Image: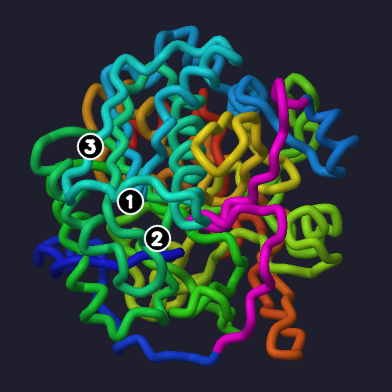
Amino acid sequence: MRYAVGTPLLAGFAAVLAGALLAPVSSHGAAARPEQAVVAVSPMVVSRFEQTGQPLTTAQCEAQYHLACYQAPQLQVAYNLGPLYRRGITGAGQTIVLVDSYGSPTIRHDLAVYDAQYGLPAPPSFKIIQPAGPVPPFKKNSDFEGWAGETTLDVEAAHTIAPGANILLVETPVSETEGVTGFPQIVRAENYVINHNLGDVISQSFGATEETFPNAASVTALRSAYANAAAHHVTVLAATGDDGVTDVGLNEVTFYTHRVVDWPPSDPLVTAVGGTELHLDAAGNHTSPDTVWNDTYNHAQNELAYGDAGPNPDASNGGVSVIFTRPSYQNGVASVVGNARGVPDITMSAACNGAIQNYQSYPGSPAGWYLSCGTSEATPLFAGIVALADQVAGHRLGLINPALYAMKAHNAPGLVPVTSGNNTVTFTQNGHTYTIAGYRAKRGYNLASGLGTVNAALFVPALAAYAG
């Protein structure tokens, strides 16, 4: 499922940050998506497979699934959050806004179970609103269950990183899929949040392939919330997507057979969050540097998620927009992005071989602990990082992209290069096997890992200083 945009940018933002729109989006041929067997498909194709009882250790996951998995305390260690927590930097006083179609009817209970398991405090405030209209009654089907899983992951991941931040869950009444579907309601809801001063950072774990929009004007017509956010110094994040350098078309089944990216992460007023694979020990310490998330060729993941040996596209999206030209903050990486907006900007944990564990109990899904992965995980994790930086700065940081690229240019502390891996994917559809060549990580900005990932103890104060 994917994303779209609102009304034209304010003139100042258009010239300085967003760049000009390119020619209208054209439609391209696509290929057939394999059905997922034991994986519940949610908006960014979050892989989920059931656990029972208590969350598993990394060793148990490796023995049972031949994949690594991590618990909340391991993520906190991996991102070096301890020094911040000891200083009282927990996101206190900040509000993380999580936007999801439908939401989950059990999210309050599920977060309470999650917190009790890991000794986390309840968020100071946890509110749920439906500003774009009432959400339909929950149904036991893949759409509602997928969004409930997405909602649960969003809330629990953000709370893991910023346990002292308030949470505002914004539920919308129309399922976001591909093209413009669901986006008018999302835009209305996000504008409501911004106009009523309800949050500091907005996390979006959804998006739509740029080519599924009729033309560039249809994207421009949906951008009002991002211009509004920039004007009110609210940070907006979006997940880049989970199919490597391809993605699906309007039918949500067949893949494009050339490189594509998604909107809204391709929007210059949005921070695009891609995915990495963590390599951690039982305590959360790194055993080797992070790599680009790519489970396409992972036999264990393919067997578990698709019921076959694969390959199937499960990887972090990255590439260049066909809608937006290069924003000024990417001028320093013009040799990589050319004249177009490039994504991602930043990367966080997303690999299925290294999945996060969360608790879910909504109808249609047996109550228990699940493993989840994808850039749907990475984005709320980074929303927590932004909330910490907002607290350090003492105010909202707004559009952080110029600060991120300035940090890289000045070798500011806390940005950790991700220099290994790629987002090439292979899949079979319509009787043909396609390999879509992706981008390889390297030192410096690249279209697989962006500017890199974060060491929070160093990154948070640096971001607060550069964006302040």
* Residue annotated with mark 1: 402
* Residue annotated with mark 3: 129
Residue 416: image quadrant is: top right
Residue 198 in the image: x percent, y percent? 17, 33
Check the image and report above or below for 424 versus 398.
Answer: below
Q: Nearer the viewer, mark 2 or mark 3?
A: 3
Answer left or right for 269 relative to 321.
left
Q: Nearer the viewer, mark 1 or mark 2?
A: 2
Decide whether the magenta segment is chiefly helix, strand or loop: loop
The magenta-colored residue range is 30-56
Could you tell me how far apart the alpha carbons at marks 1 and 2 are, in whole angstroms? 15 Å
Check the image and report above or below for 287 versus 172.
Answer: above
Answer left or right for 275 relative to 402.
right
Q: Who is closer to the viewer here, 422 or 71?
A: 71
- For label 2, the crowd category at 10 Å Cα-Cα, with few meaning under 14, some 14 to 19 and many 20 or more, is many
Could you tell me how far apart the alpha carbons at marks 1 and 3 are, in whole angstroms? 31 Å
Residue 65 in the image: x percent, y percent? 84, 42
Check the image and report above or below for 290 versus 107.
Answer: below
Query: Is residue 42 a member of the stretch shown in magenta?
Result: yes
- Mark 2 vs 3, N-terminal side: 3
Residue 51: image quadrant is: top right
